Amino acid sequence: MTQSWLPSLITATPQEGFDLVITLSRRGVKYTQPDSDKLMAMRSAYAESADGLTAASQVIAINFQTISAANNYWRG
């Protein structure tokens, strides 16, 4: 995964920012576990885990804070 896919953190709206956050979060998982077979094998375990889902939500929230700050909280 060496090609550039993230030209900027700047987005036009909070919704676009949130969409970017989801992409960032998912890509982070792919970078951490690049073996897609292993990743899919683990998915059922964390999909049924309240702790796993809470942890995923925390990652998304932290990433949204980062994108929001980069976009000056979408203030004009």
Image: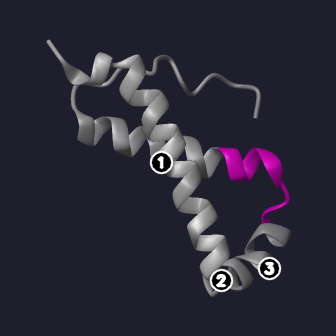
The reply, left or right, for residue 48 in relation to residue 62 is right
The reply, left or right, for residue 27 in relation to residue 6 is right
Residue placed furthest toward the left:
76
Residue 5 placement (x, y as % from top left): 57, 28
Q: Which residue is mark 3?
A: 41
Magenta span: 28-36
Dot 1 lies on which element?
helix
Upstream in sequence: badge 3 or badge 2: 3
- Residue 32 inside the magenta-drawn segment: yes
Q: CA distance from mark 3 to mark 2?
A: 14 Å
Quarter of the image containing the C terminus? top left
Residue placed furthest toward the top:
76
Residue 15 placement (x, y as % from top left): 25, 42
Dot 2 lies on which element?
loop
Position above or below: 40 against 21: below
Which residue type does callout 1 highlight? Ala
| x 43%, y 29%: residue | 67
Other residues around mark 3 within 10 Å, as few (<14) / some (14–19) / many (≥20) = few
Q: Which residue is mark 1?
A: 61
The one of 24 and 56 positioned closer to us in this rendering: 56
Quarter of the image where one finds residue 52: bottom right
Which residue type does callout 3 highlight? Ala
Other residues around mark 2 within 10 Å, as few (<14) / some (14–19) / many (≥20) = few
The reply, left or right, for residue 65 in relation to residue 24 is left
Position above or below: 75 against 33: above
Disc 3 versus disc 2: nearer the observer = 2
Quarter of the image where one finds residue 19: top left
Position above or below: 1 against 48: above
